[in-house]
Image: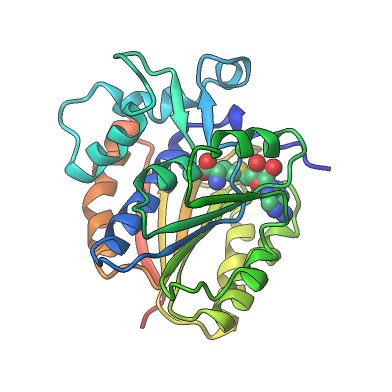
Amino acid sequence: MLSYRHSFHAGNHADVLKHLVLLLIIRSLQQKEKGFFYLDTHAGVGRYNLTGYEAEKTAEYLEGIARLWQRDDLPQAVADYVAQIKKLNHGPQLRHYAGSPLIAANLLRPQDRALLTELHPSDFPSLRLNFKPYENVTTKRENGYQQLKSALPPKERRGLVLIDPSYELKEDYDLVVKAVEEGYKRFATGTYAIWYPVVLRQHVKRIIRGLEQTGIRKILQIELAVRPDSDQRGMTASGMIVINPPWTLEGQMQSLLPYLAQVLVPDNTASWKVTWIMPE
Ligand code: SAM
């Protein structure tokens, strides 16, 4: 039973971090002319109305994308990310937000290709409809984790896999590791980006321990905390674990995170890190 709906959280601080990292990886893949494959295992619907009931109820985007919306001092990479969201908003008001599949699809060149999977019975039809106009994007109502077996290696032999579960089920913390292990066996040169929330720190440690045990190398962890860890309910931080990151990503995030921390968290409770779980 899937009850998580991303529309309640679209554009929050975790989406900002995730989608900025996504954009930087895609930009880096596009440094080469050869096409690449993008797999979004947990796609959501792709496009969110921030004035709709769900987004207004939680108003999480007000502490995320809204804090960047009207600034004129954005670092170039952040400006590039905000520009992707501006494409959806005709006018100065922030009303719509792009999910990971839409950010990626709008960046794809004719030689690139994407596969988006989503299991939710109401979200999948919206996903399919939203991506109908995109020729090089396929949507499937299938289990995202299984795609790391069935869709890899891609014929392009270059690619990015985004694994962005809702972690509604505790098994997700183990399933992401198993999925990466399966994918890596088939496609060791691919880039894999796993998003994680920090609700309870031991769950994140579980992913990290699991990845360490796979023997996979070149694993970078990027995290932005809006508050210190806590055992009370709620997400205090989020992060991206990137396997085979572009060589530029570590330095880019080291220079962007102080800015994001300051702008997204004006009350000074933020902290951030960029560290290697496994170096090369
Ligand atoms: N990646 C999206 C983005 O950044 O815009 C957000 C995805 S949301 C965090 C997680 C999504 O995964 C939900 O829409 C949920 O319905 C879906 N989901 C949960 N389990 C799944 C599975 N096993 N396979 C595919 N999708 C799944």
Instruction: Check the image and report above or below for 4 versus 119.
Output: above
Depth check, front residue: 180 or 113: 113
Instruction: Check the image and report above or below for 100 versus 56.
Output: below
The residue at 37%/60% (across/down) is: 111
Instruction: Check the image and report above or below for 24 versus 10.
Output: below
| Left or right: where 246 falls relative to 101 | left
| Left or right: where 108 falls relative to 194 | left
Query: What's the image's color scheme?
Result: rainbow
Depth check, front residue: 228 or 20: 20
Residue 66 location, quadrant: top left
Q: Position of residue 150 (x, y in %)?
A: 66, 70
Which quadrant of the rendered structure holds the N terminus? top right
The residue at 58%/55% (across/down) is: 201
Q: Position of residue 23 (x, y in %)?
A: 34, 50
Is residue 270 among the parts visible in the rendering?
A: yes
Is residue 226 among the parts visible in the rendering?
A: no
Q: Position of residue 20 (x, y in %)?
A: 35, 46
Judged from this view, the residue extending furthest toward the bottom is 215
Residue 214 location, quadrant: bottom right
Q: How many marks?
A: 0
Depth check, front residue: 165 or 154: 154
Instruction: Check the image and report above or below for 19 versus 9.
Output: below
The residue at 19%/35% (across/down) is: 74
Q: Position of residue 265 (x, y in %)?
A: 36, 32
Which quadrant of the rendered structure holds the C terminus? bottom left
| Left or right: where 145 falls relative to 209 | right
Judged from this view, the residue extending furthest toward the right is 1
